[in-house]
Image (spheres, coloured by chain):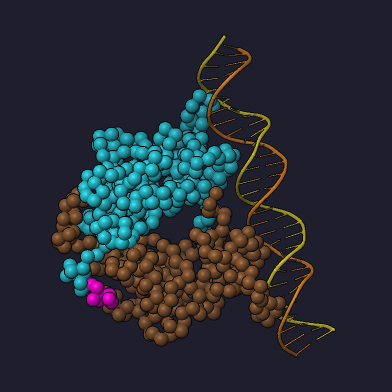
Chain colours: A cyan, B brown, C orange, D yellow
DNA sequence: GTAATATAGTGCCCAAACGACACTATGTGA
DNA sequence: TCACATAGTGTCGTTTGGGCACTATATTAC
């Protein structure tokens, strides 16, 4: 079938286009654990199962795919996440029993404290430890999506400071290192970690300190946004 | 609008879902130039303009999004490319005058000789120098997509040997280096280049040689496929 | 006060990786 | 057989990163 014939069918509604959705893997860090936001499905199909937050494009209000994701995340958490990035688009004939479907997936990060109060007010949304979520029999192919997002985040934790968005605006380097370690799954060398961060020059010393029982640690915040928050190494020139 | 209400509308055909397409940025290397495959549009909208090859999902024959891309590329080149990878999904209200649309884009590579004979038989398909293509006023947002693909390919050329797929099965290291240089846009250090490739251990010495006026160069081929063809550096452990 | 303890942050060595570039190797053709 | 052209290597100095012991600065115990 050529494009013209297809479009005629499409316009007449005689043709059923693939179901298009948007999903988000929203990570946070809380109590020494990497967690992901899950939503209990209230509709068929897969009713009752837990799923990644997501939904359909609202053609009247959304201008971009990111608008759609952010809108959906706001519905669940009350706020827009400070970091969001397209992950991958999964599509095919088999991933939804209703037929051909496509989902454009995003990875997002947010500080736990930024949305905990909102999440506590609803019962069908929860932060779940990532390792546990991966064994939970999620709806559709969401387990696969979650694993993919986790692996990508792991790569980012190795050479970027994107994981800092899972923390509050101000944070200490030991804190950030613990987040990276939780994502990567093994301890990091303190010196190497700090050297990387210093070279990237993406953090600003706030001048404040925070004590956790020993010598107080310097509080940092992210430098003003400018493109991707990765180290210079593999990007740009 | 919640999901259930949306689906009812959707099933009734009362709702117009975003137009979903798939596009490919197919690169090759020929006569010292990096080229991209373009197709002259024969249908509205944007009729007459050159565009990236692509089209709609055929729900009856395609099982995955990759099937769709490969099918479309076969229509234009006669063969399936040896390398294909999802690039990014562009979507929004403004990119197609018909309204909300989404396109899942792929980057692909192929040897020029593998499809030249087929392409010569049709008039609406052509290999175009990448730099020239980027100034050509392509259809829709295809210029943006092309630039994005080129930048991503550039990154890959810095730490992987994916560009080898723009060459025939057997190739020499000086040849491969020229491809990388064309992609990156500046000369590479011969020794560093060869060191990287040796360490990656992804090429096999065929035992054959090829002369180009001086000392004959060793012919290599890619090692059997296994995942992504990137160097170990940023991937795995 | 002062010592013990806990956490933050630095100095420094060594090994691996990389850029730069001169050198050797091996073919073609005058 | 000698110039030339292209392929491929040796090697040096710099950079990057892991490892680990050291110093720094707070709290807590006595």
Q: Is residue B231 left or right of residue A12?
A: right
Question: Does A30 sit above or below residue A1?
Answer: above
Residue nearest the viewer, comparing B104 with A99: A99
> How far from the left and from the top, in percent, is residue A197?
53, 44
* Residue at screen point 29% across, 65% down: B20
Question: Does B16 sit above or below residue A197?
Answer: below
* Residue at screen point 48% across, 35% down: A175
Residue nearest the viewer, comparing B90 with B69: B69
Residue nearest the viewer, comparing A131 with A34: A131
Q: Is residue A82 left or right of residue A176?
A: left
Image quadrant assignment for residue A48: top left
Question: Does A67 sit above or below residue B209?
Answer: above
Q: Is residue C1 left or right of residue B99?
A: right
* Residue at screen point 54% across, 27% down: A215
Q: Is residue B81 visible?
A: yes
Q: Is residue A206 visible?
A: no
What span is colored magenta in the figure?
A: A1-7
Magenta stretch contains residue B167? no
Magenta stretch contains residue A2? yes
Question: Does A214 sit above or below residue B123?
Answer: above
Quarter of the N terminus of chain A within the rendering: bottom left
């Amino acid at each position: 079938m050529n494009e013209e014939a297809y479009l005629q069918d499409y316009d007449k509604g005689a043709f059923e286009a693939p179901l298009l959705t948007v999903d988000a893997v929203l990570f946070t860090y809380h109590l020494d654990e990497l967690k992901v936001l899950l939503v209990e499905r209230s509709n068929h199909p897969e009713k009752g199962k837990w799923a990644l937050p997501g939904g359909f494009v609202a053609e009247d209000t959304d201008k971009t795919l990111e608008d759609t994701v952010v809108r959906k995340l706001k519905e669940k958490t009350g706020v827009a996440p400070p970091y969001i990035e397209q992950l991958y688009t999964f599509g095919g004939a088999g991933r939804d029993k209703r037929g051909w479907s496509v989902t454009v997936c995003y990875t997002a990060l947010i500080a736990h404290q930024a949305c905990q109060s909102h999440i506590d007010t609803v019962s069908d949304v929860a932060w779940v430890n990532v390792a546990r979520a991966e064994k939970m029999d999620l709806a559709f192919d969401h387990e696969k999506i979650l694993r993919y997002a986790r692996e990508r985040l792991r790569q980012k934790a190795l050479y970027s400071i994107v994981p800092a968005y899972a923390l509050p605006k101000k944070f200490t380097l030991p804190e950030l290192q613990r987040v990276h370690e939780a994502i990567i799954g093994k301890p990091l060398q303190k010196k190497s970690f700090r050297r990387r961060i210093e070279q990237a020059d993406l953090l600003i010393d706030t001048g404040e300190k925070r004590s956790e029982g020993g010598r107080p640690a310097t509080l940092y915040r992210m430098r003003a946004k400018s493109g991707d928050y990765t180290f210079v190494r593999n990007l740009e020139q």
